[in-house]
Amino acid sequence: MPQAAAEVLSNSPEFTVSELSSALKRTVEDTYGHVRVRGEISGFRGPHSSGHCYFALKDESAKIEAVIWKGVHGRMRFKPQEGLEVIATGKLTTYPGSSKYQIVIESLEPAGVGALMALMEERKKKLAAEGLFDEGRKQLLPWLPEVIGVITSPTGAVIRDILHRLEDRFPRHVLVWPVRVQGEGSAEQIAAAINGFNALPEGGAIPRPDLLIVARGGGSLEDLWSFNEEIVVRAAAESMIPLISAVGHETDITLIDFAADKRAPTPTAAAEMAVPVRAELAVEISTLARRAFASWRRSLDGRRNELRSAVRALPGVTELLAIPRQRFDRAAERLPRALRANTHIHDRKLAALHGRLTIRTLQSQIQQAKERVARLGMLAQRNAKLLIERRGIRLSHVEQLLKALSYKGVLERGFALVRDDNGQPLHAAAAIGTGTALRIEFADGIIGATADGDSAPAKPGAPKRNPPKRGGQGDLF
């Protein structure tokens, strides 16, 4: 190297690696503060455990690293997906740790209708695989709902068209849940409205709708994208209230159409599906009433004809009574003769009995009865005497047992029974208080006494108390 060049290089400022990286970072950020980059998402495997997203944007000949911070990713209406061509808006910066530059994405949008269609088709397959579009989940629409809930923008022409069509066909009570139908946060509002209507209680202050209509006017695929979001499709599929999807025009297709119980090509058509035409219904009811009355008349005429035919087929009174009359006449002819024959039979039986009923026969029967009564009387006296003797012996045994168990025998052996004024026996001295009136029963009688409270046992050598005199109040002790 020439000496002059070496001197020039030696005079250049000296940077540390960190200083140089910081300088490059400031240069890149100042020059490319905010950029929009179009490319295909590559290497996206979903959010990192930290919540941040790391991937790359590439085209045919270049690739740039990209990152989406956790908070930004949570607010994004359009989420990144592998292989999707997008337009990313963000800030270009460097990552000194690996000497790379990268874009910190702040917003993401699909690059054209093709990308949106591809995303929609992929999401459709995913939700269909979960069974959200199965026909078995579809509910039948009520024939004439009392309350209709409409989820749409309150300022657009859609709600006016629905209300006018309902007024023309069959006026109903309509509840409008105002929502944004496009833009940031619109999908969340639509899903919240569907869930909110379903959460209304039966018989509450706000009537629970019998039918829901989710409606929006026509627009581009980007304008209708809120109705392709998973949160809206899942809310429509889980709705317990039958739901009609009326998004866009007849050629517009969104994913909510597949999850709804019925799809209407336009909001006006949704109102026509919701209720019948009142005038046509009145005509139909009138026609059915006439047909019912005519049917009743025909049935009545048929029953009358059947009754007349049955009357003609039935025999008359004379015919019904002819044979019984003949039987009665024959029985009346035979009756006198039968009575005479019956009388003769009974007369012969009576004569035979009369022959056997003589005075000697009756006297013999009476004598036999007397002898029988006499035998029975002797037998009864003997049995009665034997029974009395047995009962006397048993009574003697019971009397002896009673004497053995009675306290009278104890009294005869020199003991006494002490009772209170109520005649209840006293079993212990502790139960007797001073001045208590007592009744003492001996074997030969009962005397009264009053306790003096001295219940201690008599000491040896103590003077004996004199026994009470007959007929007076004595001392207990």
Image (cartoon, rainbow, N blue to C red):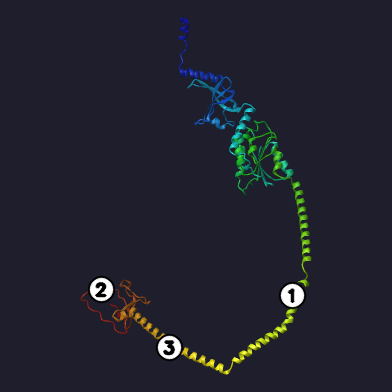
Question: Given the current orientation, which residue lies at the most extreme bottom position?
Answer: 360
Residue 477 lies, with reference to residue 288, above or below; the image says below
Q: Which residue is mark 1?
A: 324
Residue 99 lies, with reference to residue 157, above or below; the image says above
The amino acid type found where label 2 is placed reads Pro
* Residue 282 in the image, given as x and y percentages of width and height: 75, 49
Residues at marks 2 and 1 touching, judged by CB atoms closer than 8 Å = no
Crowding at dot 3, Cα within 10 Å, few <14 / some 14-19 / many 20+, comes out as: few
- The span from disc 2 to disc 1 (Cα, nearest Å) is 114 Å
**Image quadrant where residue 385 sits:** bottom left
**Image quadrant where residue 270 sits:** top right
**Who is closer to the viewer here, 431 or 193?**
193
Residue 196 lies, with reference to residue 326, above or below; the image says above
Q: Which residue is mark 2?
A: 457
The amino acid type found where label 1 is placed reads Pro
Give the left or right position of residue 33, taking residue 14 as reference: right
* Residue 101 in the image, given as x and y percentages of width and height: 52, 21
Q: Is residue 439 visible?
A: no
The amino acid type found where label 3 is placed reads Arg
Q: Is residue 22 visible?
A: yes
Give the left or right position of residue 98, taking residue 192 as reference: left
Crowding at dot 1, Cα within 10 Å, few <14 / some 14-19 / many 20+, comes out as: few
**Who is closer to the viewer here, 320 or 102?**
320
Q: Which residue is mark 3?
A: 382
**Who is closer to the viewer here, 386 or 363?**
363
